[in-house]
Amino acid sequence: ALRRDFSGADLRLQDALKYNADSDFVLATMAKVDVLRGERDRARELVNRTLEMTPECPYCWSVLGDLDFAQSDYDKAVEDYSKAISFGSSFSQDYFKRAISYIYLGQYDEARADLSRLASVYGATSEIEFAYGLIEYNQKEYQEASAYFDKSLKLRGDQPLSLFYMAMAQNALENYERAEFFARKVVATDKNNESANSLMASILDKRGRASEAADFLRNQYRNSPQGMVHYANLLVRAGRTAEAITVISEIAELYPDSPDVMAKLGTLMLST
């Protein structure tokens, strides 16, 4: 994955402000950079400042939509992207991001309307086919979802979300060999992708390869008590008892007051 040069972007944007301290575009772009790096309070302060100066700035509303989307406020994101569009946004991404927001809200007809509008202009694209697949996936129509993800991947073979959701759909269909094939592609491009590693572990476990599954969780099992218990359980079933005991001891030390964790731990210790 490409590394974002936030410091370089900051320097260039600060230089731009020297020439025009009230540039709504520069301030909104600074807010967008803050959204990308997770500094959401500062991003909101900046974008609100731009909208006070230029309330009909399409780009500013688009950035606000990105911020609300990042904070999982999909109703608000829809409002923001709709305002960007109503004020003459020339960014096709506003229609696309509004469609994705509608999908998260379960408003599939509205999502399809935006996607249809985009397809009428740009034809079939990997992103549009992915979004149609996501609609089907969210409705547990895994065969139909897979067909859309397949179209997406034929248009762009390295589309990461299509690869991931294709693996998820194949896993749900119990096509574990194909699920592993696609999940490995995701992991190969981003070894630190926790969701992909967890999915890979789940698929391998279902294929009777507990030891391999455990290896995919090695670097992230400490993120939650449930993850630690699951990791220890995989080690036990893989016959890696010494490693399992080490993890069990770690769990007991970290979560001594959690009845749920202790109950699971007791069950697990009986297996070692």
Image (cartoon, rainbow, N blue to C red):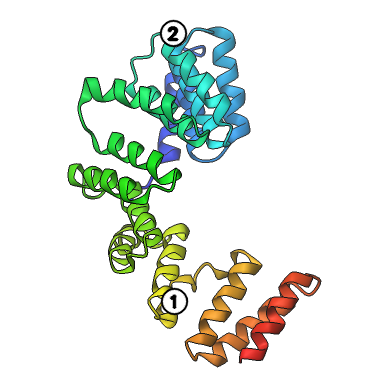
- Dot 2 falls on a residue whose secondary structure is loop
Instruction: From the viewer's side, name the closer residue of 37 and 211.
Output: 211
Instruction: From the viewer's side, name the closer residue of 183 and 54.
Output: 183
Q: Are marks 2 and 1 in contact (CB under 8 Å)?
A: no
Is residue 244 left or right of 133 when viewed as pictured?
Answer: right
Q: Bin the neighbour count of mark 1 within 10 Å (Cα to Cα): few under 14, some 14-19, many 20 and up.
A: some
Which mark, by number, is residue 105? none
Residue at 31% x, 58% y is 189
Residue at 38% x, 47% y is 141
Which mark, by number, is residue 87? 2
In percent of width and height, residue 170 lies at 34, 59
Q: Please tell me in which quadrant of the rendered image residue 182 appears.
A: bottom left
Which mark, by number, is residue 215? 1
Quadrant of the drawing holding the C terminus = bottom right
Task: Inspect this view and state whether residue 60 appears.
Answer: no
Which amino acid is tagged 1? Asp
In percent of width and height, residue 265 lies at 69, 80
Task: Inspect this view and state whether residue 200 appears.
Answer: yes
Residue at 47% x, 77% y is 214
Is residue 47 left or right of 207 when viewed as pictured?
Answer: right
Above or below, 103 against 221 in this view is above
Above or below, 233 against 46 in this view is below
User: Residue most toward the right?
Assistant: 257
Q: Label 2 to label 1, Cα distance in Å?
A: 51 Å
In percent of width and height, residue 114 lies at 36, 23
Instruction: From the viewer's side, name the closer residue of 8 and 260.
Output: 260
